[in-house]
Image (cartoon, rainbow, N blue to C red):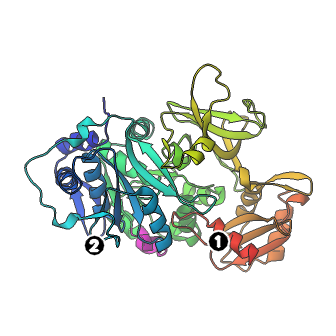
Amino acid sequence: MITNVFEYLEKTALRYPDKIAFADIDKSVTFSQLRDMAYAIADRIHEVCGDIRNQPIGVYMYKGVDCLIAFMGIVCSGNFYSPIDRHSPKARIDRIVEVLAPSAILYNDEPFDNDAFAGIDIRDIEISSEKKKYYEDNIDTDPLYVLFTSGSTGMPKGVTISHRGVIDYAEWLYDTFEFDDKTVFGNQAPFYFDNSILDIYSTLRNGSTTYIIPERHFTFQKDLFAFLKNNKINTIFWVPSALVGVANSGILDREELPKLDKILFCGEVMPNKQLNAWRRHYENAMFANLYGPTEITDVCTYYIIDREFADDEPLPIGFACKNTDIIVLDDKDERVTGPGKKGELCVRGTCLSMGYFKDYEKTDKAFVQNPLNKFYHEKIYRTGDIVEYNEHGELMYLSRKDFQIKHQGHRIELGEIDTAGSSIDGINICCTLYDDANKQIVFFYVSDTDITDKAVYKELKSRVPGYMLPAKINRMEQMPLNVNGKIDRVYLNGLLKG
């Protein structure tokens, strides 16, 4: 039984010692090299920090192979890692490091500018023949990583995930999608974003290979397709915005990816108009919609697409992953069953985070006693997402609790307007917000056609009830995206206030 993710690397390095595990445009590392470097880094950590275990260690690097080597070195040392996004504003980085208070910070270029924390440059670490297994004293409920997400108050929240959560996830992925040593991932997600967990730990478990796609390639679609083709990538797990960008560019009509046979996505709503464009070009590929917040180890429900959908239909988020229970609770904390009844999606199972790092108050608000269980302590995570079941028994995502508004006496899910808007010919991407100060719905969209705001309004009028129609329609040159590749609603909300 696997109790520590480093055991994945140990076993795979024995089976495929000379196979490339991870590669970026400048560097690649085989499984045996990754293992040996991890042991050397673990030794240096203990040399610098003493005999520590289950302590946070920061990774201050730009995205690349060295990040993954650092992660494994930290895990091998019996501690847990936290990636620090070097592109973030200094104030955010400082706040994260203040909360984390790491025993050390690993770097490979410019050291972190703070003498309060030990810095370890992984470039000058030499591999030795001795391999001390510090991690063997860990158990599966020990932390593996802390990922800092944006909090609603603007303060970063450190989501803490255990080895057990990731092992459970990696095993489910293997059973469900049959990843193996022939799988070649094209990684899009930043390593401080939980979507990257699928690429990283599926690679370690199965002896797959992951190629890290340069971020700039998602702006230049021809370069993106050349990268995917040259590296014979057959599996991608991207945020929908990345897939939408490809579909809108028209490159699907001009270029082919003969190896691509699994297309997975997660992180936000995937509009069917652009998904249908992908499905027309890759009829034999598996498409799957995965859903889940960072707090439940990336994914808790999934839907392998098995039927046709109209452009203006919403896509199901499907069914609970194995060993995960989905509970939909209404306003009275009673279970919702049957189609058409809305409630908050709540999760219980091994996938649950250990909570927010050093923030017991926020943890206790989100991870609560299961109200359906009167017999013993059992935590569930309240996602804040409103869902319902459809006639097929599939879960349908409706909106965030804070995206559900009361307007002109009606309860409105802003996501329903987004679904309608994204199906309009000429609209590439859209986002609906509520201007609370002026009590009006505002619709933002991007188009590369000559469609007018008036025409957009007319199309929306044919798709949604009158009380859902936006008071303002704003055309934009491009939709702002946050660092994870999702629509930047914080920026758009700032436009409302401006």
Residue 150 x %, y %: 56, 60
Q: Nearer the viewer, residue 189 or 383?
A: 383
Q: State left or right for residue 212 relative to residue 151.
A: left
In the displayed structure, 435 sits above or below 39; it is below
The quadrant the N terminus occupies is top left
Quadrant in which the C terminus appears: bottom right
Residue 215 forms part of the magenta stretch: yes
Q: Residues within 10 Å of mark 2 (few under 14, many from 20)?
A: few
Residue identifier under label 1: 491
Q: Residue at x 63, y 60 (%)?
A: 153
- Between residue 3 and residue 65, name the one nearer to us: 3
Q: Residue 346: x and y, percent?
A: 63, 38
Does any portion of residue 89 appear in the rendered image? no
Relative to 284, does residue 377 appear above or below in the rendering?
Answer: above
Residue 320 on the magenta segment: no
Q: Residue furthest front?
A: 116
Residue 479 visible in the snapshot: yes
As helix, strand or loop, the secondary structure at mark 1 comes to helix
At x 39% / y 49%, what residue is drawn?
Answer: 145
What predominant SS class does the magenta segment belong to?
A: helix
- Which residue is label 2 attached to? 109
3D distance between C-alphas at marks 1 and 2 = 31 Å
**Left or right: where 202 falls relative to 361:** left
Q: How many labels were placed on the picture?
A: 2
Residue 265 % position (x, y): 52, 53
Indicate which disc, 1 or 2, sits on the residue closer to the N terminus: 2
* Percent coordinates x, y for residue 225 in the rendering: 42, 68
In the rendering, which numbered label is found on residue 446? none
Segment colored magenta: 214-224
The type of residue carrying mark 2 is Asp
